[in-house]
């Protein structure tokens, strides 16, 4: 049985075997944040799970679709219910008895199939969009590498510079050859750097709030009304976000107001953040760290690169916006599950 985990030296004799269309859930809820650890095996015939998980299945699949039940478990209301019903002092547990006492409304089998089909259509569209987003990001990053790492930017008659005899000179500071006429500058030459601010009141739903790891919520206030780049200042490093609209980055972030959006974005994507960390145990970046990063400035106008890559990043943004709408639609579909007339105790 294949595994994506390193199981060398692991005693597998205590593990449980789970079959297709069976569920597994972790009863300990105190370590999982707001989400309950529960899954339905759909893609494989068999799998193995830790003995800490409880395995169960639907008794009559002609009355209750496993996929429909899994949709019920995905609802945030179920997560809150399970946390409320959990008990224990050292650690909270949502035990099997409580799980069996869970009530859920069951529509007709045909209605279940319809709801699951609608849900799958949305999920599949999101998955396809995520693949497109990844491909677009990879394409834009490949162009950046071609121009600023391999130095194969379009030159005379659109031919790649270095491989077509473009003049290269030795750079002592970088200990490598660079195109003739290129200069080493500090990052602050192409972007302003500042920090986010703490937000006392997070009520609202208009503008995204950014923490070190991305969007953490929404507010009716905004700190920036322009396109910015955001990275984590404390803790989480390496995640780089572009925000095109009004937003509120918190004090856990560093904010970049770039003269050249795409160029600055990929510089931040390619950085070795471990070398910049000044925080010891708690990783920390400062404005000065980022302002003084050494970058290569080309001889050609950077707008040439911007005009090449920006349409790709904007397409990525539009697809990401589609996914946000699809996630909202998925939430509405899960909410519809309560509007049925029959109940069953499971």
Image (cartoon, rainbow, N blue to C red):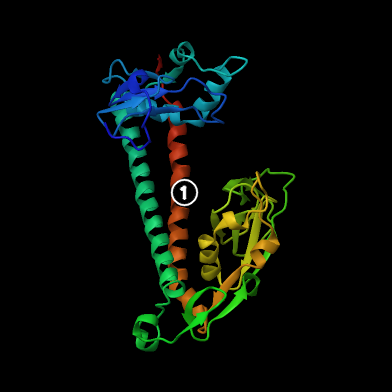
Please give the residue where the numbered disc 1 appears in the rendered image. 325
At x 65%, y 71%, the residue is: 188
Q: Is residue 265 visible?
A: yes
Q: Quadrant of residue 17?
A: top left
Q: Position of residue 342 (x, y in %)?
A: 39, 18
At x 52%, y 27%, the residue is: 79
Q: Is residue 30 left or right of residue 314?
A: right
At x 58%, y 77%, the residue is: 184
The quarter of the rendered structure image containing the N terminus is top left
Q: Circle 1 — which element? A: helix
Q: Position of residue 83 (x, y in %)?
A: 56, 22
Picture layout, residue 302 above or below residue 106:
below
Q: Position of residue 60 (x, y in %)?
A: 28, 16
Q: Is residue 16 visible?
A: no
Q: Residues within 10 Å of mark 1 (few under 14, many from 20)?
A: few
At x 33%, y 26%, the residue is: 48
Q: Quadrant of residue 70?
A: top left
């Amino acid at each position: 049985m294949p595994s994506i985990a390193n199981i060398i030296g692991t005693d597998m004799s205590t593990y449980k075997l789970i079959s297709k269309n069976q569920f597994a859930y972790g009863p300990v809820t105190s370590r999982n944040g707001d989400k309950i650890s529960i899954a339905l095996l759909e893609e494989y015939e068999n799998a193995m799970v830790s003995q800490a998980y409880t395995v169960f299945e639907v008794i009559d699949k002609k009355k209750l679709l496993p996929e429909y039940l899994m949709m019920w478990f995905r609802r945030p209301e179920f997560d809150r219910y399970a946390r409320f019903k959990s008990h224990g002092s050292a650690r909270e547990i949502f035990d099997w008895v409580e799980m069996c006492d869970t009530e859920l409304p069951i529509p007709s089998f045909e209605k279940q199939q319809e709801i699951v089909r609608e849900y799958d259509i949305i999920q599949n569209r999101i998955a396809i969009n995520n693949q497109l987003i990844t491909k677009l990001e990879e394409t834009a990053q490949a162009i950046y590498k071609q121009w600023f790492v391999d130095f194969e930017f379009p030159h005379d008659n659109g031919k790649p510079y270095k491989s077509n005899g473009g003049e290269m000179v030795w750079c002592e500071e970088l200990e490598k050859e660079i195109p003739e006429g290129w200069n080493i500058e500090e990052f602050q030459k192409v972007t302003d750097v500042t920090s986010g601010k703490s937000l006392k009141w997070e009520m609202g739903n208009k503008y995204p709030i950014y923490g070190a790891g991305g969007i953490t919520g929404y507010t009716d206030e905004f700190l920036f009304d322009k396109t910015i780049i955001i990275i984590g200042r404390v803790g989480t490093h390496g995640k780089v976000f572009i925000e095109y609209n009004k937003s509120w980055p918190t004090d856990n972030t560093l904010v970049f107001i770039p003269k050249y959006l795409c160029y600055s974005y990929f510089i931040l994507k390619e950085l070795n953040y471990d070398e910049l960390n000044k925080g010891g145990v708690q990783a920390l970046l400062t404005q000065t760290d980022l302002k003084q990063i050494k970058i290569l400035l080309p001889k050609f106008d950077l707008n040439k690169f911007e005009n090449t890559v920006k349409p790709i990043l904007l397409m990525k943004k539009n697809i990401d916006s589609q996914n946000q709408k699809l996630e909202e639609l998925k939430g509405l579909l899960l909410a519809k599950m309560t509007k049925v007339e029959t109940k069953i105790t499971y």
